[in-house]
Image: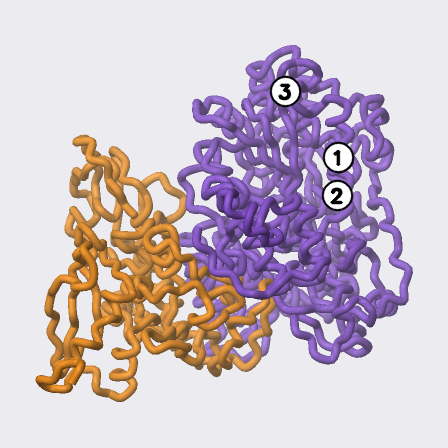
Chain colours: A purple, B orange
Amino acid sequence: MDLHLSDAQPTAEERGAVDAVLGEPESGWDGGRRDAARDGHVALGGGAHAAEARRHLLLPALQALQRAAGWISEGGLTYVCARLTVPPAEAWGVATFYGLLATEQRPRRMLHVCDDIACRTRGSRAVVEALEREVGPACHGGCEGVSGHDGSGPGGWLPSPCLGLCDQAPAALLTVAGPRPFERLVGAVTPVDAVALVKGRAVVPERSRPLLPQRGDPSLWLLGRVGVVDPTDLAAYEASGGYRALRRALAKGPEAVLREILASRLVGRGGAAFPALRKWEAVARQIEHPHYVICNADESEPGSFKDRVLLEEDPFNIVEAMTIAGFAVGAERGFVYLRGEYPLAAARMEHAIAAAREARYLGRDVLGAEIAFDIEIRRGSGAYVCGEETAIFNSIEGLRGEPRNKPPFPADAGLWGKPTLVNNVETLASVPLIVLNGGANFASTGTGDSTGTKLFCLSGAVERPGVYEVPFGTTLRAVLDLAGAPPPAAAAKDGRGLVAVLLGGAAGTFVRGDATDFPLTFEGARAAGATLGAGVVMAFDHTADLTDVLLRIAAFFRDESCGQCVPCRVGTVRQEEALHRLAAGKPLGTAAAELALLEEIGTAMKDASICGLGQTASFAVESAIRLGLFGGGKGGRKARGRTAR
Amino acid sequence: MTVAIETGKTVALTVDGAAVTVPEGSTVLDACRAAGRDIPTLCFLETLHPVNVCRVCVVEVEGSRVLVPSCSRAAAPGMKVRTDTPRVRHSRKMVLEFLASSVDLSTAPRVAEWLAEYGCRPERYGPEASAAEADERDRAVAGHHAAPGDGARATVAQPVKVDNDLYVRDYGKCILCYKCVEACGADHQNTFAIAVAGRGFGARISTELAVPLPDSACVYCGNCIAVCPTGALMFKTERDRRDAGTWDESRQHVTQTICPYCGVGCTLELRVQDNEIVRVTSPLDHSISHGNLCIKGRFGWRFVENRAAGRHADD
């Protein structure tokens, strides 16, 4: 390809960071030092096929620039393009797609402060206001008046969508670029902490262990090892039953594994509730090879943090599950697509994969069984839409993380157009115990259509936020009680108590605080006019400003739409605008007309959007309006009280 | 690009209840057209891979939970397609309304007709917000936007980009159909000077770092102009006349000729007004060019207009 590259040069630091990902350049043709004598005999970057085969390294290389310099400079971008034979316009399209990649210079020290729905009800406003007062406005780029571009002075801050630390709200993600880059999720951030973190005057607190109110309960399946078994110790994992399932799978063969998955009636836990076996079998039966296994660890649903807990606290279980999946569907390569906001989960998974490889649980010859399987981690960079399974493919392939139209489905044409199994972290986490204890045993817990146990992420107005594991069929009220949610406000004389619960996250639905006595199953939620989604249970009491929550949800979808299809790109904007007009009490025409308009917008997004993001972007809004939880609508019941500032 | 492999086999399906038979490899859109249905399209073009992003061509297919983009979905045996149900009409209306409420569609062929046909009222989204400053949208940061405050509706209005003598880019008219990116890239030109950048409503067509075209990889083939469905990309000659109010299609005629520059022999369509060439295209169904030209065929015709009557260049 005839690349048109600018003359901008990378700094030594940027060059080093990119070379650490891509290796040293081979010649002047691919960004190395010019050496006319030698370069005359070297093919251009190995040719077009070699360039195509390396395109998947684009995002990792851009991430390396971001970590090294705090942004993607023209010199850095040009160098990556020369190294990978990628047209700069395309690399620019990828770089500008992700929220955590900066294409204008920012301070090296950045605090990404969650101002999403869970943190909003737990004090993130005060954090943002303190930062605005003490540090200055949010720094999207350029950031005049904020020093720290060279890493010396104070840093900057940005508001962030949900960071998946809702059990320790309010949350923030600190990223410090430089030769020794640093990333850490910080929970329970006070305004004073936040200012100190941005100014670099605070010792960054170690992440506390996840709050796990059920720790040690012997009936736990998925959370059994969490907080009990050292997640960095393979021997401890083995001692707690780890890798027995893989041995059994290898002994019995792939068909036997598929039979157990069939018997388990396992349903995907990522939100779409698709029968797992249908995907496994479809990939296993494909004649076309190679096959791939992808663990969808891009958990970004506001209010969801269960996958983070599983990845951080029981990483070997995910590695083992992926290996079993690879064996069952005939894949030799697996990817963990892990959201960029989870540095600890990435480190733990990285470590687990390396340890498993060393112990020959991964590699060319898994446990001497002449089966090859290995796993790579790919980090996201701040894009909710990349949790959509086909967007994952594009993101890994080095393209913009835009979802693809289906069909073709991933089992037919997924990653690099090959049959691909994509499962959510929690879905995979169930696999070893299904193989070990039998699918029928798994299916004996739960209900007919929703088998096994389910993780729920409790946050908001509860005394003991955290991840809870309960058998399918437990009522919502029972789960709320486990976490110490208040009784319904409707029943209380003073109006205090639980007003509403958001089930399933931003793409989920609200239910009223006094209508929670239905079983948490896929079918039970459906009957109650709700959706389980990925298992978010966010409680709002009388102090919550639900109008503000709705506006934040609408802003979230506008921010996170990839922009590809018109219904979602413009629909999310029009939805947010209409809600703002209603909330301000300034509807165009009547409030009823605005509500009708919102319904029209929602219907088009549901019917005509390419992917699940647009198709669900109106769910929460519509359910809140239906239940009278949105303050602005005519006849709507304004949530009592407002969040104390 | 729809390349129906001639297998001789056919697919039988129904469109609005009427039986239709199309060659294997046809799309639902092909079948609808074969059945005489006039389905609106914006991001679709016969010579490009369908990206199915505008969603104006959606239809109902029995058994499908959501509406189906007819431009990209393969026609399958026994498929029951409905092109004019209330659900279909609603989504089409909303898509057209969303576009009309955010983009200047004044030079987009047929759109006015469709807006009327589907009863679109873009004004119901409020007054238009003020236009962006030059380059403001080029710097939009993914995942962040200013909250809507004053009750005005967001648009993509922005100053036109004029950075060369050959064509202008008026992204206030861009519906983000991806056609120019495809034509510049692997579908036609393989120059890759432009791509979609940013995300969500901030997404835009851009060169790297939004540099002006002369600093980009652009080779001025103008194949992006040829596929643009809204006039966002336009010959400077056309734009200047439109700005001056002297663009008058009733005084224009099209002359076909063969490009004189090289031996490929692309067919040129010269659009002429007042004895001046104002736009050059090539027919989409032309077996050699497929609508594409190079900089010489597209723009290299000024010599024809050398009005130094009767004189030779060396006089």
The single residue placed furthest to the left in the displayed view is B310
- Any part of residue B262 in sight: yes
Q: Are marks 3 and 2 on the same chain?
A: yes
- Please, which chain is the residue tagged with disc 3 on? A
Relative placement, left or right, of A305 versus B99 is right
Q: Are marks 1 and 2 on the same chain?
A: yes
Front-lying residue, A293 or B62:
A293
The Cα atoms of the two marked residues, 3 and 1, are separated by 22 Å
Relative placement, left or right, of B125 versus B25 is right
* Residue of label 2: A345
Coordinates of residue A38 in the picture (x, y in percent): 56, 45
Coordinates of residue B245 in the picture (x, y in percent): 24, 87
Kind of residue at badge 1: Pro
As drawn, the label of residue B16 is none
Observer-side mark, 3 or 1, equals: 1
Residue B162 lies in what quarter of the image? bottom left
* Residue of label 3: A439
- Please, which chain is the residue tagged with disc 1 on? A
Coordinates of residue A511 in the picture (x, y in percent): 62, 53
Front-lying residue, A507 or A309:
A309
Kind of residue at badge 3: Gly
Closer to the N terminus: mark 1 or mark 2? Answer: 1
The single residue placed furthest to the top in the displayed view is A251
Kind of residue at badge 2: Ala
Front-lying residue, A101 or B104:
A101
Instruction: Residue at 66% x, 70% y: name it.
Output: A140
- Please, which chain is the residue tagged with disc 2 on? A
Closer to the N terminus: mark 3 or mark 1? Answer: 1
Closer to the N terminus: mark 3 or mark 2? Answer: 2
As drawn, the label of residue A315 is 1
Could you tell me which secondary element the residue under label 2 belongs to? helix
Specify the quadrant that holds the C terminus of chain A: bottom right
